[in-house]
Image: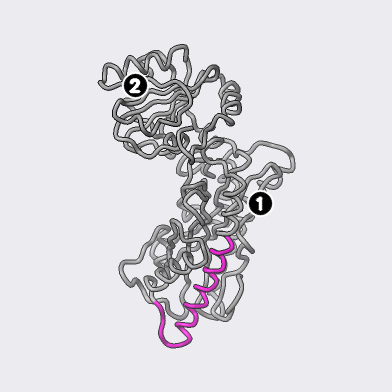
Amino acid sequence: MTGPAALLSEASLPEVRDALAAVELDGWLLSDFRGRNPVAASLLGLKPLSRRWFALIPREGEPRALIHAIEQGPWRSWPWRKRVYAGWRELESGLEELLSGCRRVAMEVSPRSGVPTVDLAPAGVVELVRGLGSEVMSSGELVARFHSRWTPDQLAGHRVAAVALAEVAADAFDRAAAGVAGGRPLTEGELTAWVRGALAARGAGVGADCIVAVAERASDPHYAPEGRGAEIGAGQLLLIDLWGKVSEDGVFADQTWMGFLGERPPDDVLRLWNAVREARDAGVAFLEVRAAAGALVCGYEVDDVVRDAIRARGYAQYFVHRTGHSIDRELHGSGVNLDHFETRDERRLIPGTGFSIEPGIYVPGVVGLRSEINVYWSERGPEVTTPNPQVAIRTLAMRSGTA
């Protein structure tokens, strides 16, 4: 509404109003201070401002904003009523006027901080709003619908990035294998730097980075090598997790692939891999069945299915993170997470949004494996956007293509 990157617009107002009416809310109160609520700022196309601002999207009537006297410039394109304040007394009286007639409003809060990516409104601001007579409800469903939904251009860009990531990962395994075969093994740090450069060269370099972890270091899900890191040698398991997007306004692709520097991984590693792969595929199958039945799907339900598959194999204690995260303009987005472990995300999957499915098994100090794919949730159901999801661990003998 205020800038070219605004996610809420005059055209989307009717849909916002319908969404508010469906859950019996009188309005959606957006606010920010110094970028503490990036969801609110991006919804209005604003950069972080140094003074507090509030904007109400009401179920009935026109939106209205409360802005500081020294920061009116960013609001020039706001087409509706604005009230300007300078001191704190004016702020509080202005906020009271802004909320007039609003008995129940949505804000970026989450009960018991159940969904941290939505729990962004400061406790003091919430206290102030409640003190003015408005009941504060979570905007989590609204955030998923209006902040994390992909545009057609973003979906197209995501697909481009997904292909680039898969190709770079395959080339990275070949590069590691060539180093071993040539007697000059690469280090984790060297391969990490190469992956970053390759992602940029293939047009997926915005926000790009990766995790390269060899042998027991992969048992730390967020391992990052220090300096050169460990040497990638023969007979070792290699995890490559990489991500990037094609533009600042694009959405990320995020993938994890597994390789083995030898002819055949050990049997115990293959057993772990089969458990991870089957759990990943069970999550996709569950989504397909629910979509075919026209049933709603909550984030926590997918996590249950995937985690149960790991549990059935006897490895539940080694699956220590959620099944998947929302993906939007941020790598870990604000939409629905596939989570009933770290949190319980009860939000429903919204058509037009995307997420990862990435079960993993991590035996501390011994071994770690993960398979990560991305899924776009369309009106027709799940679309796996990761090209040729990995079926077998890639081995040294496999010099091209994906496993």
* Residue at the image point whose x is 48% and y is 68% from the top: 201
Among numbered discs 1 and 2, the one appearing first in the sequence: 2
Q: Residue visible at 46% across and 48% down?
A: 330
Majority secondary structure in the magenta region: helix
How many numbered marks are there? 2
The quadrant where residue 39 appears: top left
Does the magenta run of residues contain 130?
no
Magenta highlight range: 162-186
x 40%, y 69%: residue: 193
The residue closer to the viewer here, 298 or 377, is: 377
Residue in front for this viewpoint, 145 or 109: 145
List x then y, in percent, for residue 248.
Answer: 47, 51
- Residue that carries the numbered disc 2 in the rendered image: 84
Residue 182 magenta: yes
- x and y, in percent, of residue 51 in the image: 30, 31
User: Residue at left 44%, top 68%?
Assistant: 197
Q: Which residue in the protein does label 1 denote?
A: 383
- Residue 315 visible (yes or no): yes
Marks 1/2 in contact by CB < 8 Å: the verdict is no
